[in-house]
Amino acid sequence: MPETVFSKPDALRDVTTHYCPGCTHGTIHRLIAEVLDELGVAQRTVGVAPVGCSVLAYEYFETDFQEASHGRAPAVATGIKRARPDLVVFAYQGDGDLASIGMAEIVHAANRGEKITVVFVNNAIYGMTGGQMAPTTMPGQVATTCPLGRDVESAGHPIRIAEMLSTLRTPAFVARTSVHTPLLSVNTKEMLRRAFTHQVEGRCFSLVEVLSTCPTNWGIPPAESMAWIEKNMLPYYPLGVFKTPESGSREPMPLEG
Amino acid sequence: MTKKLMKGSEAIGEAAVQAGCHLFFGYPITPQNEIPEYMSMRLPQVGGTFVQAESEVAASNMLYGAAGSGERVMTSSSSPGVSLMAEGISYLAGAELPVVIVNIMRGGPGLGGILPSQGDYFQATKGMAHGDFRLLVLAPWSVQEAADLVQDAFDLADYYRNPVLILGDGLIGQMMEPVEFAEDRQPVKVLPPKDWAATGNDGSKPRSVINSLFLDPEALEQHNFHLGRKYQKMERDEVRFETYGAEDEADVLVVAYGTVARVCLSALEELQSAGIKASMVRPVSLFPFPYQAVREAAAQAKTVLVVELSMGQMIEDVRLALEGSKPIHFLNRVGGMLVSPDAVVEKITAIAEGKSEEVVHA
């Protein structure tokens, strides 16, 4: 009998996604599902879907899900985890959702040390609404609301979420990865495994920022999109682990007097 | 059962705990801070969790997550904070999540003031937020009633899978009165298990997805019809009101809710000795509004007086109830100013003597 050596993860539903050709949401979904399966936690996992291209993420995972309003996935995940600490809770968010409208929720969920995992998919543009400028859009990058390219004089520079959150004292694990090469995808899975493991083992907040493509709204073919990440995003959004439970002291400073 | 002297805010918090609510998410805003403060002290004693949210926006979404997990959960706020929660409340209604929200109203619009008001009646009963939905709205007039309604609110929220709003004002939150909590309290509804909650899927039941997104217009229409049937059932089964002398003929029928109704009741007692016959209907549920009760009580009266701490909001429901059958007069104070019993006596006397002008709408 031939042996099955590659199959769909159990935590992923057997459905066709709506994602565009060359979009890496599907890859990231799969990596999360593989990690949930391998950790054996899929049956007690609740995902939180965002508003954005991955608004229908709840259709693609086999786990229970809650659909959040725009930007509020970390608050919804907080509510779930506080209500049911026995569940494994993850939020899946894009750059408009997390880094623009939801900035307050992500910063405070991270700073409270909510025992949740956030997967932050950064493709430097608003996808679902049709290619508007995101907080992570690169300087000079053309978007429908910056037709001449992002002007840092009026729009400022792109926000580096992983770096910013790693300045907080509380979070356990903050990393940035990419999925534009097979090797980096393997690395992304490892980062996701570390992030979910911190949660499963009861340590606090973990976030993995994943650089992602948007050929449709970048206006370039899928293969070139992979190269575009390499050339334009990697120099500004370096990959790596920015924070671990071991990095930095978390001892509160005693009050005097 | 023993009575205990409690501040309204504390009684609201304790009532929630007694009703099995072990989760509270909220953001500070005057004049309701005693509720989150009480919960931050009380919930750890019962193994519960209090989280001070970064904003009311976040608080309402924490409610969503917790309620979607099948647990009883509450928040409290005051008018500007409730406006910030409005988006979240629309999602809660759309996803059919049971939560209890307390609004201790203050004057507005904008930052307004921090003193009692009833300016959020429209928001509570007609237009909380975007989309086609209703909240069940209950308005207490005493600390004991606030405690009772909060406990009922959790049952009603679970039964209808819908947010329930407790609409109070600064007086309810601040005044101290004796309260008792029944030790053997039974739910006001037979509550089915929350098998819809998203608590993990081991394959023994269908996957749970908490959601208010319906991209297919036919599916959304069916969802709207389904929600509409729930609101109709509330209108049929959940009308709450009290009447005071409304069976007898009267010169003036007063319609007032919340603490304003207490002021009016004092005035009614005073008028009795002066020989002016006045009665009162006090709506306790604001949605559903007791249209029939107001109509029937008004049938016994020559005129109707609506008293509110707003520029005239509930009066529109009274007009709907009466459909032009009786003249309506209006007495109000706003901005945090209160209606005094003397002002009510004076107004009713003026109405009885034909010296008050009725409200005329073009």
Image (cartoon, helix red, strand yellow):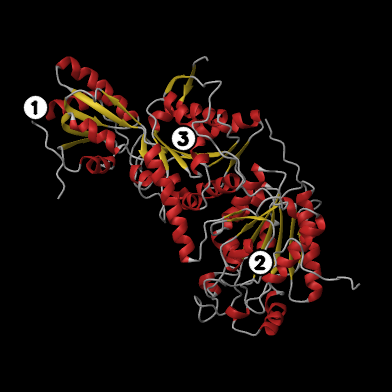
Name which residue lies at 40% across and 49% down: B128
Amino acid on which disc 2 is placed: Val
Residue B286 placement (x, y as % from top left): 35, 38
Secondary structure found at label 2: strand
Give neighbour class at mark 1: few <14, some 14-19, many 20+ (Cα, 10 Å): few
Check whether the beta carbons of the residues at disc 2 and disc 1 lie within 8 A of each other.
Answer: no
Q: Which numbered circle lies on residue B96?
A: none
The image quadrant of residue B292 is top left
* Distance in Å between CA atoms under marks 2 and 1: 72 Å
Q: Residues within 10 Å of mark 2 (few under 14, many from 20)?
A: many
Q: Is residue A134 above or below residue B65?
A: below
As helix, strand or loop, the secondary structure at mark 3 comes to: loop
Q: Which residue is mark 1?
A: B353
Residue B334 seen in the figure: no
* In the foreground, B274 or A205: B274
Q: Amino acid at mark 3?
A: Gln
Residue at which label 3 appears: B32
Label 1: which secondary element: loop
Gap between marks 2 and 3 measured at Cα: 39 Å
Are circles 2 and 3 on residues that touch, CB within 8 Å? no
Q: Residue B170: x and y, percent?
A: 39, 32
The residue lying at 60 percent from left, 29 percent from top is B42
Q: Seen in the image, is B338 located left or right of residue B228?
A: left
Residue type at mark 1 is: Glu
The answer as to whether the residues below labels 2 and 1 share one chain is no
| Quadrant of the rendering where the C terminus of chain A is positioned | top right
Which residue corresponds to mark 2?
A121
Total labels drawn: 3
- Rendering quarter of residue B282: top left
Q: Is residue B351 above or below residue A72?
A: above
Crowd band around label 3 with a 10 angstrom C-alpha radius: few (<14), some (14–19), many (20+): many
